[in-house]
Amino acid sequence: MQILIIEDEARAANQLQNLLQTLRFEYGLLGIIDTVEESVEWFQNNRKPDLVFMDIQLADGISFEIFQKVQLQCPIIFTTAFDQYAIKAFKVNSIDYLLKPIQETDLQQALEKFKRSKQAPALDHETLKRFLSDMQPASQREGILVKEGDGFAQIRISDLLYAYSEDSVTFGVTQNKRVIIDETLDQLYPSLNPNQFFRINRGQVVAKSAILKIDRYFNHRLKLTLIRARDLEFIVSRPKTNDFKSWMNR
């Protein structure tokens, strides 16, 4: 049994492998891929795996974009922190859908369903097309819930300069303070205005208004200078460089 894991969070990929071992699921790992771009390249140059575990939100976009570029006909178990994707995931070449953090019993049921299946479901192109056209929310949120003392407070999205993940904690920085955001970057980013915010890598989201300078960086990446950058480096990952340039030109 040869499997491929498409997942942009190392911790989630490791947890999945640990659960598979706990369930005594025998498999060979073909690789762990964390971007849409690298996934497309992999499928274009390799034989299809027996099973794919595919996160929906990847480092450079939504994994459903992979289907636009390659004819993918293999069983897929989708994983994501966003349960609103569940129904649509079932309709796009999916064996099952697992909500993060993945529970052992849910994974076991998904694997049993996979074993009962004779072949991959047919790819529903119309559902995929509608799904991708609806990816941007009709309206973006205006506030973010943050931790304050023993309770919570709200900051305005318009005040957010950047957000980043560190040691499994999400921080947000405004002109006046650094706050702890009560959600992960995976939960936060899709709700932000895509014209104002960009996820430059797995762990950092920046506001266009906070960018002071853009420099070339080695390995075809970009280095950003931001307002109130503290001691952090802001590096646009190579797979996201072209999209970042396009975003800056809007």
Image: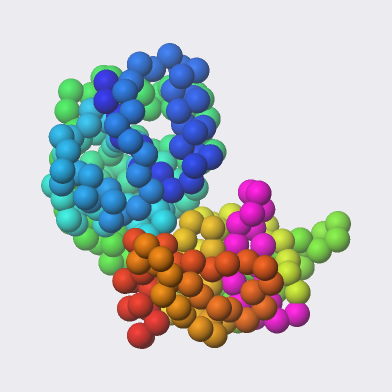
Q: Quadrant of the N terminus?
A: top left
Looking at the image, is 148 positioned above or below residue 79?
below
* Most foreground residue, 59 or 158: 59
Where does residue 83 sit, x and y in percent of width and height? Answer: 46, 48
Looking at the image, is 91 positioned above or below residue 225?
above
Question: Horizontally, is 44 left or right of 23 in the view?
Answer: left
Looking at the image, which residue is at 75% across and 80% down?
Answer: 176
Looking at the image, which residue is at 35% across and 66% down?
Answer: 220
**Which span is picked out in magenta?**
159-176
Looking at the image, is 160 positioned above or below residue 28?
below
Where does residue 15 sit, x and y in percent of width and height? Answer: 51, 32
In the rendered image, which quarter is residue 210 located in?
bottom right
Question: Horizontally, is 79 left or right of 11 in the view?
Answer: left
Question: Horizontally, is 83 left or right of 111 in the view?
Answer: right
* Most foreground residue, 23 or 119: 23
Looking at the image, is 116 positioned above or below residue 8?
above
In the rendered image, which quarter is residue 53 located in?
top left
Residue 196 shows in the view? no
Looking at the image, which residue is at 28% across and 56% down?
Answer: 37
Please, which residue is most extreme toward the front here?
A: 218
Where does residue 192 sit, x and y in percent of width and height? Answer: 51, 71
Please, which residue is most extreme toward the top here?
A: 24
In this figure, which colouring scheme has been used for the structure? rainbow
Looking at the image, which residue is at 38% across and 27% down?
Answer: 110
Residue 226 shows in the view? yes
Question: Horizontally, is 31 left or right of 163 in the view?
Answer: left
* Most foreground residue, 144 or 127: 144
